[in-house]
Amino acid sequence: MGELDFSSHTFPASELSCHVDELTASSQGTAQSSAKMVFCNDEIIHRRADLPAAVIFLPLAEALILHPELVEAHFMRRESQLGSAKFSALHAAQLRNGTFLYVPDDIAIEHPIEIHHWLHGENTASFPHTLVITGKNAKVRVIETFRSVTSDQHGLAIAVNDLIAGANSTLSHTTIQALNPSSKIITINESTVAAGANATYFLLSVGASWSRSESLSRLEGEAARSNMLAVSAPGGDQEYDQRTFQHHVKPGAFSDLLYKNVLHDESRTIFSGLIFVDEGAHRTDAYQTCRNLLMSDAAEANSMPGLEINADDVKCSHGSTSSQISEDEIFYLRARGIHPDAARQLIARGFCVDAVSRLEHEATEAMVLGFLDGKFSLLATGR
């Protein structure tokens, strides 16, 4: 329970002490982006946008003043269902800023929109919120990163995002969690998917000493589609707690969950997932898979997939696997002149690639793999 003691964390000093120019320069994502926001301790330090005039891309505090009806209609409309109600309440009570994005009907944004969060200062607490709404037939891709300014300062982030995918729209959101190993983070995602819409939520976890992620997808229309993806690479004594909920409300919807965990040293993961099919949600097609690759004998992976079906004519499956890294595969690579450490890294990377490739966007995949390779390199050197 010590991981849940946040009493030492406080808001940062009112005067922003971040190195604004340096952080802005370091907030690089894909080669091309349509818009960008950079925050340090929930204070916006950089904003750029090259978007159609009808698109609204604002700090959440401004959007609440200029577009209150849109914000209030979708902001945290449902109570947390995965055990973090108190953390959601704390987030709502302490929220100071975040990002608001509204893409109206029939507008497709060509390049990703980037949101960068930096945590700075000893025992600093951050409560960023991201609200993304797509209209009918709209299309957008969002990439959100969480990083620490220094490598050793203790920090806490409780981050929430609401993703609202309108009818026949396409909404993709990628979160990259790369805080320093002294920090803690709770991420809570809720996606609402209308008829014919396609929503993808991807989470990469490579940082923080302790992380808890909750992801809920609510499929509210015929032919709605939800993709829930995650890759994590804990090492040392890092612990990642993952909780998911695929909620099929209406008939004829599809959801697919794939979580990949690569565990090093004495790290630990917990996965608890549920597919829930409401009464009358016939022709549901749902899948849930959690796979764990253990890179050491001391690593521990716990998986608890589940189903609760209250309708007929459904196709649902769930499962989990855990296995040690294959010595035969390592031998195969060593026989071709590859160093054992590099061989292990290649195997771990290959294990993760199929989840990353489901993003179906080359630049985003490259960004995710860059962070993942960086973590594998640190683990290989023992840092």
Image: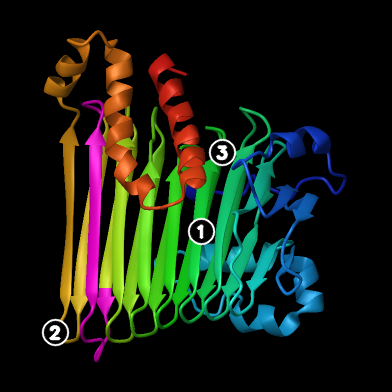
Q: Residue furthest right?
A: 15
Q: What percent of the width, then of the height, locates residue 87?
A: 53, 62
Density class for disc 1 (Cα within 10 Å; few <14, some 14-19, many ≥20) is many
Residue 350 placement: quadrant: top left
Report the mark closest to the observer, 1 or 3. Answer: 1
Numbered range of the magenta stretch? 276-298
SS at badge 2: loop
Taking the image as shown, residue 250 lies to the left or right of residue 163, namely left
Residue drawn at point x = 48 percent, y = 39 percent? 366
Report the mark closest to the observer, 3 or 2. Answer: 2
Whether 293 is drawn above or below 88: the answer is above
Residue drawn at point x = 17 percent, y = 46 percent? 321
Q: Which amino acid does the dot numbered 3 rest on?
A: Leu
Q: Which of 189 and 89 is in front in this view?
A: 189
Q: Name the residue under label 2.
A: 313
Q: Does the magenta stretch include residue 324?
A: no
Mark 1 and mark 3: span between their CA atoms?
Answer: 19 Å
> Does residue 83 appear in the picture of this structure?
no
Q: Which amino acid does the dot numbered 1 rest on?
A: His
Label pair 2/1, CB-CB below 8 angstroms = no
Q: Nearer the viewer, residue 159 or 24?
A: 24
Q: Does the magenta stretch include residue 295?
A: yes
The circle drawn on residue 160 is: none
Q: What percent of the width, then of the height, locates residue 39?
A: 73, 49
Q: Name the residue under label 1.
A: 173
Q: Mark 3 points at which residue?
A: 179
